[in-house]
């Protein structure tokens, strides 16, 4: 008996996103970190040069399509927890922030390997092309909505 995979659509994409995000959020919760805080912290840690707080907020807001006030609150929480330190206009990751991000990444890595493992490279490439196109079109629609 063979089963037919569902055609990719918004529902299938959403289900995959929320399932994968649910895995990540459970790991983050064990470390007292929210998804949005992790995205802000990762953006600060991986920046080529130190971003200003406004640049960091704009980057995360653009990525997550999140409310600016929520992103600023996440940034503030990270400073309060001393995972980022305010260095003038530049929020910089502390050693504790880098260590926490590394710890959560290490905990998620084997789970990600089990989730993504065994998927043929050509399937991943095709999915990547489709998802990039969907992202591009959805962002264009958001731009027209104001």
Image (cartoon, rainbow, N blue to C red):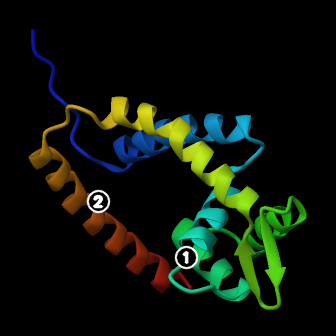
Note whether residue 65 is visible: no
Q: How many marks?
A: 2
Residue at point 35%, 35% (across, down): 113
Note whether residue 129 is visible: yes
- Residue 120: % across, % down: 13, 39
What residue did someone put label 1 on?
62
Q: Is residue 142 left or right of residue 94?
A: left
- Residue 87: % across, % down: 81, 85
Q: Is residue 128 left or right of residue 70?
A: left
59 and 85: which is toward the camera: 85
Query: Would you identify the image quadrant in which residue 137 lies?
Result: bottom left
Q: Is residue 52 above or below residue 10?
A: below
- Residue 58: % across, % down: 62, 82
Q: Earlier in the sequence, mark 1 or mark 2?
A: 1
Disc number at residue 131?
A: 2
Q: Is residue 51 left or right of residue 112?
A: right
**Quarter of the figure with the N terminus:** top left
Residue at point 65%, 80% (across, down): 56
Residue located farthest toward the right when viewing the structure as drawn: 80
How crowded pointer 1 is (Cα within 10 Å; few <14, some 14-19, many 20+) is rated as: few
Dot 2: what SS? helix
Q: Is residue 48 left or right of residue 67?
A: left
Disc number at residue 141?
A: none
Dot 1: what SS? helix
Residue at mark 1 to residue at mark 2: CA–CA distance? 17 Å
Q: Is residue 13 above or below residue 42?
A: above
Residue at point 45%, 39% (across, down): 109
How crowded pointer 2 is (Cα within 10 Å; few <14, some 14-19, many 20+) is rated as: some
């Amino acid at each position: 008996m063979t089963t037919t995979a569902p055609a990719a659509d918004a529902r299938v994409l959403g289900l995959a996103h929320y399932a994968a995000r649910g895995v990540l959020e459970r790991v983050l919760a064990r470390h007292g970190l929210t998804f949005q805080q992790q995205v802000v912290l990762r953006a600060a840690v991986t920046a080529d040069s130190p971003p200003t707080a406004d640049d960091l907020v704009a980057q995360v807001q653009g990525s997550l399509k999140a409310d600016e006030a929520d992103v600023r609150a996440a940034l503030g929480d990270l400073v309060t927890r001393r995972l980022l330190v305010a260095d003038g206009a530049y929020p910089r990751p502390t050693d504790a922030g880098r260590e926490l991000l590394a710890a959560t990444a290490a905990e998620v890595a084997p789970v990600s390997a089990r989730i993504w493992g065994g998927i043929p490279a050509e399937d991943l490439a095709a999915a990547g092309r489709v998802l990039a196109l969907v992202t591009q079109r959805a962002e264009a629609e958001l731009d027209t909505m104001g």
